[in-house]
Image (cartoon, rainbow, N blue to C red):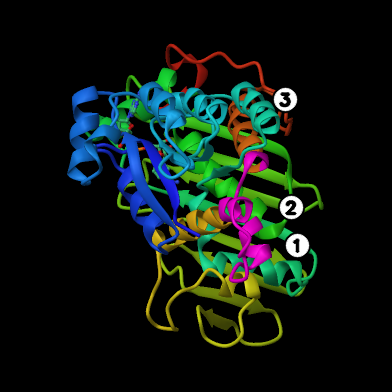
Amino acid sequence: MRKIRMGMVGGGKGAFIGAIHRIAAQLDNQIELVCGAFSSDADNAVASGKALYLDEERCYRSYQDMFAKEAKLGDDKRMDMVAIVTPNHLHFPVAKMALEHGFHVMSDKPATIDLAQTLALQGIIEQTGLLYGLTHTYTGYPMVKEAKARIEQGQLGKIKKVVVEYPQGWLANKSDEDNKQAAWRLDPKKSGISCCIGDIGIHAANLAEYVTGLAITDICADLSSSVAGRVLDDDSTVLLRFNSGAQGTLQASQISVGEENSLKLRVYGETASIEWSQLEPNSLWMKYSNKPSHLIRAGVGKMDAVTQANMRTPAGHPEGYLEAFANIYTQFSYQIRNRLFTDTSDINEAAMKDVPGIESAIRGMAFIENVVAASQSELKWHKFSLEPQSITIPSSHTNIRNKA
Ligand SMILES: NC(=O)c1ccc[n+]([C@@H]2O[C@H](COP(=O)([O-])OP(=O)(O)OC[C@H]3O[C@@H](n4cnc5c(N)ncnc54)[C@H](O)[C@@H]3O)[C@@H](O)[C@H]2O)c1
């Protein structure tokens, strides 16, 4: 038995999410970072690896170089998996090359730049038989898992309504675009067909489907931008219908001034409802029509076995974003360990399988394309489809309702 060896593409000095992935991957001592191609700039890539005290020979100048060289290393050294934390347009070429060189993939969302690429990726995953995980971070929170378990157990009765919102304010004005994270997210060539829906609406949709176990079937959407010169959306309002007949609303925004990452989910059933908010992630409210509301706190009382397998600290010692990310990595590392070694006695099987994979990737990319298509359509409702939508990447404001 040994740790799972990980390489990283992206996440160099000055990047946002790469550092979070590194902390998360290594939190439970199941994974070690052994190499990387950390930046589009070769010198920065090497400097970023050296700043992490990696072996200089394994601080690669490009991901192409990394996959070619790592594939030639012996079993005692070669990385097992790669974490992809680049802008969206590189997720597919990097994942493809990784799989073709024999490495498991953990990718950040959205899986690729469009649905056609994700479907192609599915084919490569099937061909290679390798593992693929997607960091839909919010599914990693213990109280999100507890909400899912309680809905599965029927504690809410039949689900009637799902309300999910993800407001942020960091792209409210033109002056907010002066950083690298904004620059590529607002560029269709690097971001894809959508900014706001592709960046955070996709998380909200994934959370709604994950917790309820329902599938979105119909969409009515209104995307817009309120900043002059933007070709991609920065605000959205979406109506949803689910396969059970439940209805829902999804609101994602990057122009809601003063909002942080205020992701919130409410699910209303026939007999009870639940409410979870990322700003209070260790709390889960259950509400009833005929008795007082009930606050469930992480670690207090008996939790579902999957929830339990994703918690580390006793009640009142709060876990948060880093630990939610870490849960995805640790469970994924168990999937790899399960293939490499025979001792799997400490692994909770259901928790191990509860990592977003290629199916979530496909539904996520389909969600982005269906929402953009719905927003561009004159019809009120658009059928959710797992086929690529014919949408042209905008080159001017004409494809979104621009309020500027
Ligand atoms: N799961 C989440 O909660 C979450 C949160 C934030 C971002 N993300 C996703 O993570 C990804 C990265 O976002 P970010 O905000 O960290 O972006 P960023 O701009 O801060 O970082 C991107 C990094 O990729 C590197 N890069 C670009 N081209 C490269 C190449 N050819 N080879 C190697 N590295 C290259 C850049 O140099 C930079 O270091 C995006 O896909 C985004 O959607 C997910």
Residue at image coords 33%, 23%: 62
Magenta residues, as a range? 335-359
Task: Check disc 3 and report the residue beneath it.
Answer: 387
Location of residue 213 in the rendering, given as x and y in whole percent from the top left corner: 72, 56
* Viewer-nearest of discs 2 and 1: 2
Location of residue 256 in the rendering, given as x and y in whole percent from the top left corner: 37, 46
Q: Taking 203 as reference, is 274 above or below it? A: below
**Residue 139 image-quadrant placement:** bottom right
Q: Nearer the viewer, residue 247 or 94?
A: 94
**Residue 284 image-quadrant placement:** bottom right
Q: Is 347 within the magenta? A: yes
- Badge 2 element: loop
Location of residue 129 in the rendering, given as x and y in whole percent from the top left corner: 67, 36
**Residue 78 image-quadrant placement:** top left
Task: Check disc 2 and report the residue beneath it.
Answer: 214
Q: Amino acid at mark 3?
A: Glu
- Dot placed on the residue nearer the N-terminal end, 3 or 2: 2
Q: Is residue 237 left or right of residue 213?
A: left
Cα distance in 3D space between marks 1 and 3? 27 Å
The answer to whether the residue labelled 2 contacts the one labelled 1, judged by CB atoms less than 8 Å apart, is yes
Q: Is 161 within the magenta? A: no
Assess disc 3: are there few (<14), some (14-19) or many (≥20) residues with their C-alpha within 10 Å of its C-alpha.
Answer: few
- Dot placed on the residue nearer the N-terminal end, 2 or 1: 1
Is ligand 1 less than 8 Å from the beta carbon at label 1? no
Quadrant location, ligand no. 1: top left
Q: Nearer the viewer, residue 370 or 224?
A: 370
